[in-house]
Amino acid sequence: MKMTRKAAWTCVAACCLLSGCHKEQGDAKNETSTKAERKGSADEVTLSPQVQSEEKVQIAPVELGTAAATQRAKGRIVLPDNATWRVGVLAEGRVEKVYFNLGDSVKKGQVLARMHSHDVHEARAAYANALAERSRLQAAEALAQKNYDRSQRLYTLKAESVSQTEMAKQELVNAQSATREADNIVRREATHLEETLGLRADASADSSDDADLIPIKAPASGRILQKAVTPGATISPSTDAFVIGDLRHLWMLASVDTTTLSKLRLGQTVTVTLPDVPEATYAGKITNLGQEFDPVTRLMQVRIEVRNPDTRLRPEMLASAEFITGDGMPTVLVPQEALQQVNGEDVVFVRLASDLFRVQTVQIGENVHGKVRILQGLNPGEQVITHGSFIAKSQLLKSSIGD
């Protein structure tokens, strides 16, 4: 009987041990399941209230705003005809000195280069001859004046006839006329030297080594966009030595179809953007609606004047123009800082619970009053992370690496 009780107690103990083992295994499974639930799916991120507070994460509801209907057109940046200067010369010669290079900023009147020309020697010789001839004629005029004065005195003394006095007077008039003509020739030769060739007429007043080198000057302030001269190069009046452009004012030629063209007007404001620099936006104004359609593309080139205060725009850059072509319409808007890029897609983080957020892929549109238009992926009223969305992105990437 004692042996029977002992065996019974042994069985009870064994059952308890087995029951305990099963309970521990069950608790372990429950704990694993709980952890899996906490971890969530791959498109969810957990941010504890403490992390949100420390990182100053801000959450705001998605707004329903108003955006005007717009159309985009591609095009390119070009130099305007009225802000481009081609710098040439009026005489043939050889370039001796060049002071500026491509991309340099210049001011109106600055000397860009200097050249030697045989025209300078011919012009100086002509000017010297004109001076000598004027001196000779001035001396002849002085003599004619002296003779006329003498003739008048003799006529008063009845020692000379009227005809002789009139002849002396006529000789004085002729001498004065010749002197005036000589003055005109001197001024003409001086003008040719100073205004046409850019040299001082009085060579003795300029003792520098460049006194006989023709200066090539900038006709306006701007930036050197083309340069076709180097020291030793021969240049002629048919050559453009430099091309200067004012990059603060440029044109964009935007290619638009007939539907878009019918909704545009002269003077309409336009937003110009660069595809490679998303944050760069420029204000523009339509100044010409084009003349004829391209027979191949069936597109019209609309001319837009663009202000370029930071001079980041350059001729021949590709650009996009955004035209307002309709009235305002309801649209979903979020702050720019709410957007992040994950795997090449634009995403926001939508709040599911106080510490749980879902990665939501969205399709974005244009900027509207400092916010981004959401074309697809969000509904008004949903709460998204605005400030601090990069914290959620970092947590998402860490979770992906951990997996």
Image: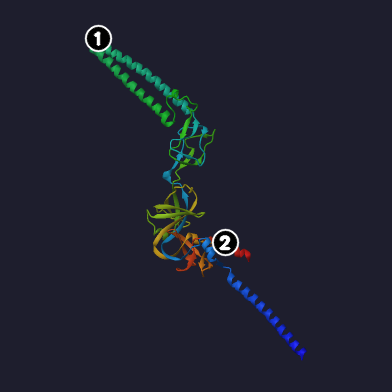
**Image location (x, y in percent) of residue 107:** 44, 38
The quarter in which the C terminus is drawn is: bottom right
Q: Which amino acid is tagged 1?
A: Leu
Question: In front: 232, or 2?
Answer: 2
Give the farthest residue toward the bottom.
Answer: 1
> Residue drawn 37% across and 26% down?
187
**Image location (x, y in percent) of residue 181:** 34, 23
Question: In front: 100, or 138?
Answer: 100
Question: In front: 268, or 27?
Answer: 27
- The 10 Å Cα crowd at callout 2, few under 14, some 14 to 19, many 20 or more, is few
> Residue drawn 36% across and 22% down?
182
Residue 343 seen anywhere in this rendered image of the structure: no
**Image location (x, y in percent) of residue 339:** 51, 61
What residue does disc 2 label?
Answer: 394
Q: Which amino acid is tagged 2?
A: Ser
Question: Which mark is in front, 1 or 2?
Answer: 2
Which mark is drawn over residue 154?
1
> Residue drawn 57% across and 63% down?
395
Which mark is drawn over residue 163?
none
Numbered disc 2: secondary structure? helix
Report the side of 44 relative to 198 (left or right): right
Numbered disc 1: secondary structure? helix
Q: Earlier in the sequence, mark 1 or mark 2?
A: 1
Q: Quadrant of residue 90?
A: top left
